[in-house]
Image (cartoon, rainbow, N blue to C red):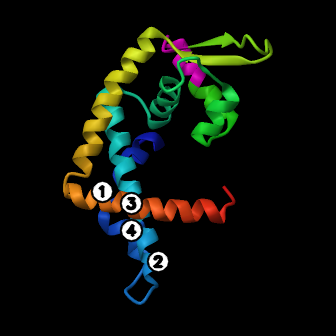
Amino acid sequence: MPREKAALKAIPAALDAETRVHDDHHVSLRLWLRLLSCTNQIEGRVRQNLQSSFDTTLPRFDLMAQLERAPQGLKMSELSQRMMVTGGNVTGITDVLEKEGLVVREIDSADRRVYRVKLTTEGALQFRRMAAEHEKWVIDLFGAVPPRQKKQLMELLGVLKEHLAALNGA
């Protein structure tokens, strides 16, 4: 089985990150590994769904999502920062999407040495279809959590996010 296909398989719950801890470990460590385990499982399912439903990858979806939020287009360096990947990764994904007619590179009017990447009309249509399905998948994945608890979890994770940003000087 090719490596890409193997990576698409969901991580079995019995082998996830949380199996490393025991009740005697600090609750913060257990919580972190539970968050990591949930994140990995959600991401794995989204990757599988993107592949089976749209024959695409999560990095391609992420790049198109960034462009959908920026109709004026984004510089390659901006895409790299927003996606938190190297410029080489962004270039490779952009090259493929451009060949498929889903994005276009245009010279930046403010700096002719720089290209802006934009979704084409077809790229925007394809992304909207994928995004609508993606939203349904995520809603389904969180289906076991009652609405009130989802709101509470959002608030608690917001507190954690603010604390982490403060630690990082943001």
Total label count?
4
Local SS, label 1: helix
Callout 1 crowding tier (Cα within 10 Å): few <14, some 14–19, many ≥20: few
Distance CA(mark 1)–CA(mark 3):
6 Å
Q: Which residue type does callout 4 highlight?
A: Arg
Distance CA(mark 4)–CA(mark 1):
18 Å
**Apparent side of residue 19 relative to residue 75 in the rendered image (left or right):** left
Q: Which residue is mark 3?
A: 155
Residue 129 in magenta stretch: no
Q: Which residue is mark 2?
A: 28
Q: Which residue is mark 1?
A: 151
Q: Which residue type does callout 3 highlight?
A: Glu
The C terminus, quarter of image: bottom right
Residue 59 badge: none
Q: Which residue type does callout 1 highlight?
A: Lys
Dot 1 and dot 3 residues touching (CB under 8 Å) = yes
Q: Which residue type does callout 2 highlight?
A: Ser
Distance CA(mark 3)–CA(mark 2):
17 Å
Question: Sequence-wise, which precedes: disc 4 or disc 1?
Answer: 4
Residue 34 badge: 4
